[in-house]
Image: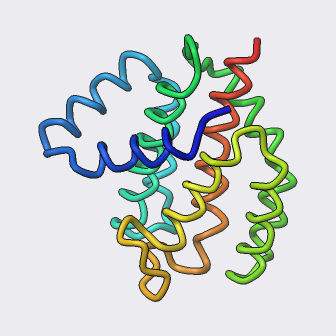
Amino acid sequence: MISAETVAQTWQEISAYSNDEATQSINQMSKEQPIILAYLLASSENELFDEDEGQLVLYIGVVVWQIVERGLKDLRRVTEKGLNKAQRANEDLLVKLAADSAGDFLSASETLVENYPEPEVLRYITGALIEGEEGDPENPPIRDENLGLAFLHLKIVLDAFLENNEQ
């Protein structure tokens, strides 16, 4: 299991990246996890997200990749088949999250975190979406109506990493 310390340390390191380091990280991801990067780029360009929301989804996805890369031994490359499997497994969640309010999202995400194989990583995703990197719940980086969709995209990425690593 990935520790809260690994999650926090990775997030802090990446949040301090210069533009060059961020570009290098994206280039590394394009070589090591091209399917996940393509999915994150497509997700970040979803028409429902404004530009800042789309960039945040991509950024959190890169942080999640680094957390999983550091926290799990021998992370394998996610295949298109593996990503599709994670997407199918989350179809019911998509329907539920689409109908939920922001308060319902908080409740649903807390329940998911408690029962998730990597609860600290999922907790990071939820916190980053609700409070942003500044930790300010009064100024959330994602509009309430897009919380569920952003969470879903990032959970699919995490699920694909975890499923791929179990095989």
* Image location of residue 85, percent across then percent down: 77, 29
Image vertical order of residue 38 relative to residue 59, above or below:
above
**Can you tell which quarter of the image residue 117 is in?**
top right
- Label tally: 0
- Quadrant location, the C terminus: top right
Image vertical order of residue 9 relative to residue 137, above or below:
above
Residue positioned 38% across, 65% down in the render: 133
Image vertical order of residue 148 relative to residue 161, above or below:
below
Residue positioned 33% across, 50% down in the render: 12
Q: Seen in the image, is 155 located left or right of residue 99?
A: left
Residue positioned 40% across, 70% down in the render: 50
* Image location of residue 100, percent across then percent down: 78, 77
* Image location of residue 52, percent across then percent down: 34, 67
Residue positioned 63% across, 62% down in the render: 149
Whether residue 63 is visible: yes
Q: Nearer the viewer, residue 114 or 166?
A: 114
Q: Which of 106 and 91 is in front in this view?
A: 106
Q: Nearer the viewer, residue 118 or 35?
A: 118
